[in-house]
Amino acid sequence: MLKKNTHHAGTWRPLQCLHIVALFIAIYLLFLIGYRAMPESVGRSLNHTLNAKPAAWLLNSFVPGVLVQTMETRLLGMTAGIDIRKGCEGFEVIGLLLAGILAFPTSWRARIAGLVGGVAFVYGLNLVRIIGLFLVYERIPAWGEAAHIIVGQAFVILLVLVYLYGWIEWVTAPKPAAGAPFKAAG
């Protein structure tokens, strides 16, 4: 187990890093095995409840001139629609986040805080991605595939990596000693 704040002091040893990477890979693979074993009906139900309905509500409530209906996992507009399939709900990115947080040596309290905040962050990002994809397909259909395959995926993964980096910085930052006087900045 690494000592707290060791990455700031430059004392990480190669075997410690290798241990973290191996643990990350093992956790992510276990997550993917469980995710792939999830019955298709469960995935459709989750996508309808957690993605399609909230995305349709947000689009209808906040985007002028858009009228969206849901049909199971599909968002249907006036000129276009998208189907939120297994793999589009953000679970694989949540798996990356979960593996990164669980593999990093820190307290369980910090891990739980990171997971709760991270899952909410990924869910929000994924809803933004779904809404953005719907609008691209509705308004600029020629850009739809690029937005779906390249931009949307990269956007979510990059921001999750930034979240992980920020979380690691937070859990490894020196904490003031108990009873230490507070110093105001300035």
Image: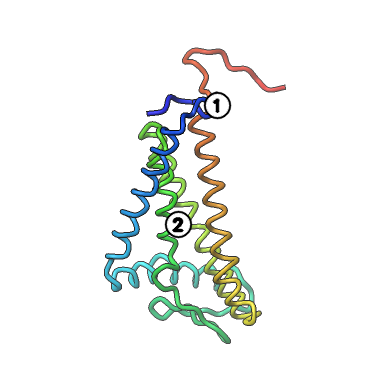
| Foreground pick, 68 / 34 | 34
Query: SS of the residue at dot 1?
Result: loop
Q: Amino acid at mark 1?
A: Gly
Q: Specify the quadrant of the image occupied by residue 102.
A: top left
Residues 30 and 147: in front is: 30
Q: Nearer the viewer, residue 1 or 185?
A: 1
> Which structural element holds mark 2?
helix
Quadrant location, the N terminus: top left
Residue 65, percent from left and from top: 63, 79
Real-space Cα separation, disc 1 to disc 2, in angstroms: 29 Å
Question: Is 180 positioned to the left or the right of 94 in the image?
Answer: right
Q: Is residue 93 above or below residue 130?
A: above
| Image x and y of residue 186, in percent | 72, 22
- Please tell me the numbered disc located at residue 44: none
Please tell me which of labels 1 and 2 falls first in the chain: 1
Q: Is residue 74 left or right of residue 140?
A: left
Q: Nearer the viewer, residue 43 or 77?
A: 43
Residue 120 image point, x, y percent = 46, 52
Q: Which residue is tagged 2?
A: 93
Name which residue type carries label 2.
Answer: Val
Residue topped by disc 1: 10
Q: Position of residue 40 (x, y in %)?
A: 30, 72
Residue 43 position by quadrant: bottom left
